[in-house]
Every structure is written in structure tokens, then in C-alpha cells.
Amino acid sequence: MELSERIQKLRKSRKIERKQLAKDLDVSYSSLSKYESGERTPDYLMIKKIANYFDVSTDYLLDHHPNKNLASLVADGKVLYGTVEKMNKVAKLNDINPKYIDLLLEISNLGITPESLELIIESFKIQKDKINDDNKY
């Protein structure tokens, strides 16, 4: 999917009129229209602004898919880089279920921001607490 299509898809999925988005991004209606039609490409700063507005990554907007065979793992405050296979071995050594590594890679590929991920994790915690409370009775 092209950048122009992603911008338009995000705007429409949130039911935002083009005029309103142009105002919110502090760009002319004409420029936004050209971004969405693919007639013009926004500059780097505008791409960042659009990504922040919709709470998505610039990688998502640009349809950038990092090498899926490479991964990083944070352990003991250190970032480790390598192949997925290597990260799964590290995970096993650190008693981490390799399925969690696969899940993290999938989340990364979706372009979910760290802030959004924190909200997702918090909602999981709430659900877990509710289940635990229900099981007590």
C-alpha cells in the first residue's frame, strides 16, 4: 500500500474530514488532497506529524518492513541484535518463552507505538485481574 493510500485510509477509518485533518496538521487542503492522491509526497517532517497525529509509526506510513529474519531483544537493560533463531536461543537461555519473541516481532511489524503497546498491556492486566477475581468466587 502506498503512502497516499495509508493517509487516506487512516483518515477515513477515523471518520475525519479532509478539511479537518488539513487544519489539524496545519497544511493546506490542497496539499493534503495531493498527499492522498499520490500527486505529491509529504516531506519528512510532515510524515512525522501525520504519524504522530494518527499514533502510528513512520515505518507503518511508509510501508517499511524491516528484515523479518532480524530481531532485537532487551535483556538486563541491554539490547541484543541478531537473527530470530539467535534471539529464540537467547530467550531459552533466559527462560523466556520463544512465542513471546514471535509476538513481539509481530507487534513490531504492525507499527504499534510504544505508547499504544503500554495501553494494550494495561488492558491485559485489567482483564487478568477480572478473571482472577471471578475465579475466587
Image: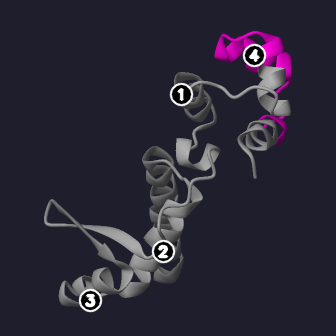
Residue sitting at 54 percent across and 48 percent down? Answer: 59
Upstream in sequence: badge 4 or badge 1: 4
Upstream in sequence: badge 3 or badge 2: 3
Q: CA distance from mark 4 to mark 1?
A: 17 Å
What amino acid does circle 1 point to?
A: Tyr
Q: Which mark is residue 23?
A: none
Q: Which residue is mark 2?
A: 103
Mark 1: give few (<14), some (14-19) or many (20+) Cα within 10 Å.
few
Q: Which residue is mark 4?
A: 22
Stretch in magenta: 11-31
Residue sitting at 61 percent across and 29 percent down? Answer: 53
Q: Quadrant of residue 25?
A: top right
Q: CA distance from mark 3 to mark 1?
A: 38 Å
What amino acid does circle 2 point to?
A: Leu
Q: Mark 1 or mark 2, which is nearer to you?
A: 1
Q: Return the x and y of residue 49 as percentages of the image width and height.
A: 56, 25
Judging depth in this view, the residue of 1 and 113 nearest the camera is: 1
Q: Which mark is residue 44?
A: 1
Q: Which residue is mark 3?
A: 89
**Does residue 60 appear to the left or right of 6 in the view shown?**
left
**Does residue 68 appear to the left or right of 28 in the view shown?**
left
Upstream in sequence: badge 1 or badge 2: 1
Q: Return the x and y of residue 131 as percentages of the image width and height.
A: 52, 75
Mark 3: give few (<14), some (14-19) or many (20+) Cα within 10 Å.
some
